[in-house]
Amino acid sequence: MRLYVQELKRILKSTRARVVIILAIILPMLMAVLASEFNDADYLDANGEKVFLHGTAALSMIKESSAAGNGDVTIEQLKEALRTYQSLYEETGTDPLSSDYPLDRYWQDVKPIASRLRMITQTYSKVDETLDLRTISVDSLDSFYEDTEKKLTDVMKSDTLLRDPAMISKAQQIFQKVKTPFSVYYGYTRDAFDYIEFAVLILVILSAVLAAPVFSERYSSGEDSVLRCTINGRSKLVMTTILAELTVVTVMYFVGIGLHLLISDQIFGIETLKESVQSLYTVYSLPSMNLLELQIVLAFSGWLCCMAVTAMSLCISAKATETSTAMVLSLMIVILPTLLYSISGGASWMLALFPSASVGLSNNMLMSLVDLRFLMLGGTAVWYPTVLICTAIVEFFLFAFISHIMYAKHQVTK
């Protein structure tokens, strides 16, 4: 325990660690604030002049105008939303969802039902053709939730990467667990959840920066030569160092992501976390979660990735004798999956083997959950988020073990 405490102090006393920890607190908080800036709204004032709102002011107006539409998406509410849409179209001769529709009536009559109308459109549109809501019968919505599963099958059959029968069968098994009716609570946006993944990516990068020089700087400074001569200089020292580094990274990660989610939830509203994933994204999204549960999964999966990346950085540091080399290699491995995903255009086993496979721009855990992504293992289809979590856990223990072996066997002199 004494050696563990000494290692913690040694890490926290370094200027690099202090800078990294400060950035790990400030940057996720900044990401939460920036997420609220992607809200825009306009309305007509008492004089008939158009007023533009941005940021939190627009968000407040959207939430206030949409409050009447919050709650469970029952079949009767879907029918009523469709009736309202069709009657408004017939009355005005203008599509209520178009930009030409009168603003004052849009906020009052259309905005509260907009999410339900979007769900109907998603479910009954053909893969290559958008549904005209005037042509659909109200009574056809009786089988809405059964039709969402049919929509899932149709979408997968139309995609050359997903039409494998094993993938379709696996997706149907997962989708059958989705809770119905869906719930709608206006507030959180897709952009806001993208910023959660940006915050996770920043924290993972900072973890690599913190861990990469741990052993290599000892080699370059000659400190390692002295430490190896002590009674605890090899096996016990490396285990204690790894444990101390993982402790610092874990605390740093959860403080950073916790502050991000706390600020974000306060801005967008705690009550909006009751919304279903299917309401915010697509009706055939597979996770059986509300937005609060989605946040927890993203935070936990981000931590697993953070642990795997830290262990990988320690492994590189135990081998590299130059601090700059360890740093560059660690950051390259963190960023590489994003570049490879944009080139390959999809999930693959090769990408999943990277410890940072679940963080990035398009290759992150959020997109893996709400999009339809599967991998084949022989004749068995495996949901990609499951692969990402399993590989992160395995690689964390694997790289931590290899770090121990590499440092213990490192030769100070040739």
Image (cartoon, rainbow, N blue to C red):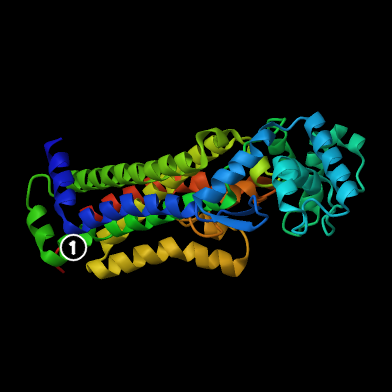
Looking at the rendered structure, the secondary structure element under dot 1 is helix
Q: Is residue 334 above or below residue 399?
A: below
Image point (61%, 67%), residue name:
344
Q: Quadrant of residue 346?
A: bottom right
Q: Which quarter shows the C terminus? A: bottom left
Q: Nearer the viewer, residue 316 or 53?
A: 53
Is residue 25 found left or right of 161 in the rendered image? Answer: left
Q: Which quarter shows the N terminus? A: top left
Q: Position of residue 374 (x, y in %)?
A: 65, 50
Image point (53%, 59%), residue name:
351
Q: Position of residue 279 (x, y in %)?
A: 67, 41
Q: Is residue 193 visible?
A: no
Image point (33%, 68%), residue name:
328
- Residue ID for mark 1: 217
Image point (56%, 59%), residue name:
362
Which amino acid type is marked by label 1?
Glu
Is residue 75 found left or right of 311 in the rendered image? Answer: right
Q: Position of residue 397 (x, y in %)?
A: 38, 45
Q: Quadrant of residue 77?
A: top right
Q: Nearer the viewer, residue 339 or 116?
A: 116
Q: Nearer the viewer, residue 70 or 328?
A: 70
Q: Nearer the viewer, residue 270 or 20?
A: 270
Q: Position of residue 221 (x, y in %)?
A: 12, 65
